[in-house]
Amino acid sequence: MSDSPADLVITGCTVLVHDERERIGFEEDAAIVVRDGVVELVTSAAAVADRAAAERLDARGQVALPGLVNCHTHAPMVALRGLAEDLPTEEWFNDVVWPVESNLTVRDVELGALLACAEMIRGGVTCFADHYFSMDAVASVVAECGMRAHLGEAYFSSQGPQGREKSLEFALRHRGGADGRITTALAPHAPYTVDDADLAATAEHAREHRLPVHIHASENRDQTDASLARHGVTPIEVLGRTGILDTDVLLAHGSGIIERDLPVLAGAAGRTAVATAPRGYLKFAWPTTTPVRALHDIGIPVGLATDGAASNNSLDVWESMALTALIQKSTTGDPRWLTSRQALHHATLQSARAVGLGETVGSIAPGRRADIVLVDLTGPHTQPVHDLAATLVHSARSSDVRTTIVDGRILMRDRELLTIDVPAVVAELGERLPALVDRSHGKRIQNYYT
């Protein structure tokens, strides 16, 4: 440890830590020393009482957690929050969302991304995996607001070869952007909108350029049943035969994964992960949810996600954590699964692994990037604390996050956002909404027909 002044010292907090077996524990009256965007030391508050630092944060009564990762979202879709309500999936896509998305301009995407990043920063999310259109604008927002992001330019086969090539060009151009805070992926939309030839070409691009793939797959049981009826294979098997599973791949949702998919996933040559966004599944009344326990048993990490706010109405990963734990208890019929500590593992290291950052973020330890959130547990709804893990998962809320730090930079201090002017964003977005939501043209960017 250097004796020169640190960039940031956080003192007096309880720190969530992982032991050598990745079991979660808590160190009380602790301190975190940050230098050059990296955690230099986790120690006792007393040990750094006289340590010089450019900035010190007194975090007594607060818990320091690794910043949350939203493993699958469409950030600009906050502009559509509440627009398509109480609809089945097919009508949601075909009658509202895809007609409206045909109106999207680059500025709409930029404003939506700004509003989404503000919401996520305030909810303790330090990194998000985004899969959308006009992603140059999202990359610009990430650079401006200070978050970390894993970005992919989505494409459909209906766009022709240029859609696939644009996704590759985006990934290559922005890889390592925003001072290293941006990682990138190839982003075919889904097996039902991207044909086998494009999937195979994407897999080849991924291998050649060492890029991961982020794709919707087996989102719900209807998609799996339709694929079996039409093609005799599941969407997961399609990804296997086209080579996508030979790459590092992040599968969004997977609530339609069935028993025959498990050996396919277990035998995948690449690093495979699944992102679960349970609130949307409940809202669409899907009959099944992401099979977290079955995926756990074959060693596949499941990261927490929200999907876009057009379906989820929220970018609250805190809520995704609690719902994942509760729904797993209900669907397995076992109150011992998922425990609060298991839920916190999904929210931290598993989510970091899902987006390919398992060696970089996901824990507060020397050498890790300093992506840290401070959570205030002094409110009446979080007292008394008998089991700190349970308090964090089932009692605390995203609004209890007081401070959000990415790469050692404070993006929100004591609930004050420091990098985004929310009133200005909301005002301009409001002016643009009539043109954005107009569906009188009768067009849509795609048809949902699985």
Image: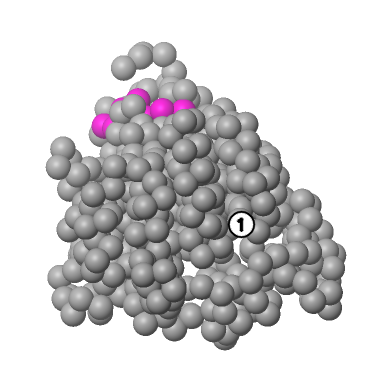
Task: Locate residue 10, reporting x and y percent.
Answer: 40, 36
Residue 413 seen in the current view:
no
Q: Which residue is mark 1?
A: 156
Location of residue 258 (image quadrant): bottom left
Which residues make up the magenta segment?
A: 37-43
* Amino acid type for the residue under numbered disc 1: Phe
> What coloring was used for the rendering?
one colour
Mark 1, other Cα within 10 Å: few <14 / some 14–19 / many ≥20 = many
Residue in front for this viewpoint, 249 or 380? 249
Q: Does 221 appear above or below 342?
A: below
Q: Residue at x 34, y 77 (%)?
A: 288
Q: Is residue 106 above or below residue 3?
A: below
Q: Is residue 37 visible?
A: yes
* Residue nearer the viewer, 231 or 404: 231
Secondary-structure class at tag 1:
loop
| Tag count | 1
Nearer-the-camera pick, 224 or 118: 224
Name the residue located 34 percent from the left edge and 59 percent from the top edge: 237
